[in-house]
Amino acid sequence: MLKKDLILKSPVEKAIGVENITKGQLGAVLSRAGVGKTSFLVQIALTQLLADQKILHVSLDDPMDKINLRYDEAYTNLVDNIGYVDPQKAVRLWEDICPNKVGISYTESTFNTDKIREYLKSFKKSDIALPTILVIDGLNFDKDVSATLKELKSLNQEFGIFIWFSIKSHRDEAWSQEGFPVQLEAVKDMFDKAIFLKPVEDKIEAVILKDGDRMNQTYRLEPATMMLVE
């Protein structure tokens, strides 16, 4: 029951839909630095954990102890958002789902698709359920990443894993005529889903840039917690 309540309160359930998180191959969360890309990616992954799925989080920016802290904070924010929850029950649930989260930290120079492929193969060899999503946080989209994206898309075909990226945009950059940040414009056809986060007054506005016919829907979030403004 607690799992279901937490999922229903997740900003991801409203903005994307739990059943929609893994429909397709590639998804992106975009914003300029410091707005909340990683926090929203963690909420996406957390929603999958609450749905009893495995996730793989790859960071090219932060060590895993920092990423693990983000997951702890995201879970706490979600629990606090549904009202009173027996603290012991909340702790037991986190201890139950946390082992389904695997994190790996790389640098830009050490990251490559073959390493991810071999890691996923190790799940199969050990007859362990595969992660349903792969989060890649910190890939530099200011460079030409089309070849890397093609390689990563092949992981979806091979392992059935949906891949979510963070994409950093920059203040005062002009968007394309089709309404995409320049970092996404060149590779937009490779993405099934894209969400842009932007500060609006004292809140964050999550704008659906790409997700079938749901384009341009908007949702308001609290910056400190990434929870939906009701």
Image: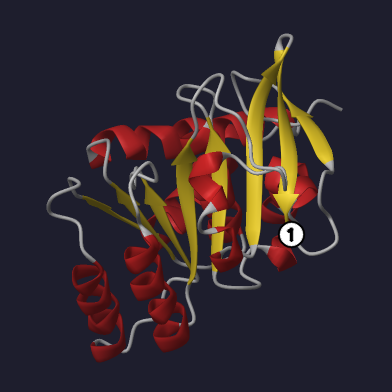
- Residue 113: % across, % down: 25, 69
Q: Residue at x 71, y 43 (%)?
A: 177
Residue ranking furthest to the left: 110
The vertical placement of 201 against 165, above or below, is above
Q: Is residue 214 visible?
A: yes
- Residue 35: % across, % down: 54, 24
Query: Which image quadrant is residue 212 in?
Result: bottom right
- Residue 117: % across, % down: 26, 77
Horizontal relation, residue 105 to residue 157: left or right:
left
Q: Quadrant of the N terminus?
A: bottom right
The vertical placement of 164 against 14, above or below, is below
Name the secondary structure under disc 1. Answer: loop
Which colour assignment does the render follow? secondary structure
Q: Quadrant of the C terminus?
A: top right
Residue in the foreground of this view, choosing between 96 and 44: 44
Residue in the foreground of this view, choosing between 182 and 65: 182
Horizontal relation, residue 207 to residue 125: left or right:
right
Q: Residue at x 59, y 39 (%)?
A: 181
Q: Residue at x 49, y 43 (%)?
A: 183
Q: Which residue position holds label 1?
A: 211
Q: Is residue 10 visible?
A: no
Residue ranking furthest to the front: 177
- Residue 105: % across, % down: 22, 48
Horizontal relation, residue 221 to residue 214: left or right:
left
